[in-house]
Image (cartoon, rainbow, N blue to C red):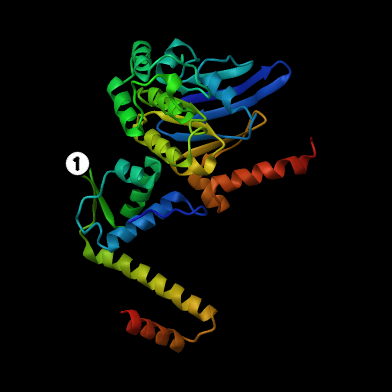
């Protein structure tokens, strides 16, 4: 696919003996919202970390907008890590300064507006914030960039269900329309409606890549139901464990 | 009106049906402008691409027309809207008759029940 934003070919990653990714071939287009789904330990975070250049693949090729992960791709990729990495003494506004300094596409005004609508006081220190509020600040930092690729690793895991809807709405209304959003999660039913397509990972392999509407049409059930079915049935049939 | 989305069918189809219902019910009158895709998508909590597909279906069903400069509008063809409305009404009537038949009532019983309901609540 010539216009794909993400292209992986034979991508593998080993941690010592353990294979986190095994021969992943994946193409993702532009302007899509994609769910990266899989049980714990299936390789979701590893794939995201390779895409944003934090990890190097053991084998295979990966390109983002036609280039290997590096300084250029970092300028167009906005990454939400699965854990917090900010100093506790900082205020949200300090973080905005930092991001404005590092990323040309960071929109400070947008960050302030998003804080207001999420009910976060940007003058508060990180250490005084609840877990959910910290997650919101992280999300604001990531979504206030006009990036081409947003990599969101478990963006809704720590917040209550009502805030989840609000956060999904924030993602929907704030992503750059020409940009692609890749969201890893196992809370599928909460985000199914906003996804264009889903990628199922299992034991480091892509076992399904299709649009949400195709899955519903072909299977007559939701992606969440299909996920539960696939990952419940598998250990029984092979007897590999 | 709230959006109701179920798990068993493609989301765009459900959105398209519910938009069609809003049009035939006059919530969006003939010739009126439809809200932008992004606004409708945010309201329903769905992906804009999905809403886009739902609205494209409305166009091929003849309920909406797309204007390059002014966005999308409800068709001015009142006959087209009426025809869709009639189809929906027929389907609801058929569903009622078949559900009533499942309970073991005859057509006459069904009509009598309708009349009775009409007299007490209408």
| Residue A3 visible within the image | no
- Compared with A24, B7 (above or below) is below
Q: Quadrant of residue A138?
A: top left
Classify mark 1: residues with Cα within 10 Å, few (<14), some (14-19) or many (20+). few
- Compared with B75, A25 (above or below) is above
Protein chain holding label 1: B
**Which sits in the foreground, B66 or A155?**
A155
* Quadrant (top left, top right, bottom left, bottom right) of the C terminus of chain A: top right
Apparent side of residue A38 relative to residue A144 in the rendered image (left or right): right
**Which sits in the foreground, B36 or A63?**
B36
Residue that label 1 marks: B69
Looking at the rendered structure, the number of numbered marks drawn on it comes to 1
Percent position of residue B98, x then y:
49, 76
Q: Quadrant of residue B95?
A: bottom left
Question: Which residue occupies 64% across, 24% down?
Answer: A21
Apparent side of residue B15 relative to residue A156 in the rendered image (left or right): left
Percent position of residue A55, x then y:
57, 15
Q: Quadrant of residue A74?
A: top left
Percent position of residue A79, x then y:
46, 22
- Compared with B100, A212 (above or below) is above
The residue lying furthest to the front in this view is A128
**Which sits in the foreground, A37 or B113?**
B113
Percent position of residue A41, x then y:
65, 29
**Which sits in the foreground, A70 or A170?**
A170
| Residue A72 visible within the image | yes
Apparent side of residue A224 relative to residue B107 in the rendered image (left or right): right
Label 1: which secondary element: loop
């Amino acid at each position: 696919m010539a216009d794909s934003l993400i292209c992986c070919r034979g991508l593998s990653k080993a941690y010592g003996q353990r294979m986190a990714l095994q021969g992943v071939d994946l193409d993702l287009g532009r302007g899509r919202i994609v769910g990266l789904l899989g049980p714990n330990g299936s390789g979701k975070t590893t794939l995201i970390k390779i895409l944003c250049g934090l990890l190097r693949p053991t084998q295979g090729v990966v390109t983002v907008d036609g280039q290997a992960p590096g300084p250029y791709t970092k300028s167009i990729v906005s990454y939400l890590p699965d854990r917090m990495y900010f100093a506790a003494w900082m205020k949200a506004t300090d973080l905005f300064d930092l991001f404005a300094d590092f990323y040309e596409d960071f929109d400070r005004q947008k960050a302030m507006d998003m804080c207001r609508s999420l009910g976060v006081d940007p003058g508060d220190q990180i250490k005084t914030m609840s877990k959910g509020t910290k997650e919101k600040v992280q999300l604001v930092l990531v979504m206030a960039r006009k990036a081409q690729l947003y990599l969101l690793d478990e963006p809704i895991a720590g917040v209550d269900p009502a805030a989840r809807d609000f956060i999904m709405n924030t993602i929907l209304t704030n992503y750059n329309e020409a940009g692609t959003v890749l969201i890893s999660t196992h809370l599928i039913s909460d985000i199914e409606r906003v996804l264009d397509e889903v990628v199922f990972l299992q034991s480091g392999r892509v076992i399904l890549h299709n649009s949400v509407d195709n899955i519903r049409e072909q299977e007559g059930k939701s992606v969440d139901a299909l996920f539960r079915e696939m990952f419940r049935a598998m250990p029984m049939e092979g007897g590999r464990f | 009106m709230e959006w109701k989305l179920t798990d068993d069918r493609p989301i765009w189809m459900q959105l398209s049906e519910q938009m069609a219902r809003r049009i035939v019910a006059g919530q969006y009158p003939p010739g009126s402008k439809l809200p932008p895709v992004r606004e409708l998508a945010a309201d329903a909590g769905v992906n804009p691409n999905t809403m886009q597909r739902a609205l494209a279906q409305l166009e091929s069903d003849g309920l909406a027309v797309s204007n390059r400069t002014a966005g999308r509008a409800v068709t001015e063809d009142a006959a087209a809207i009426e025809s869709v409305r009639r189809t929906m009404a027929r389907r609801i009537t058929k569903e009622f008759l078949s559900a009533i038949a499942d309970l073991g009532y005859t057509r006459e019983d069904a009509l009598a029940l309708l009349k009775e309901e009409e007299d007490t609540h209408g």
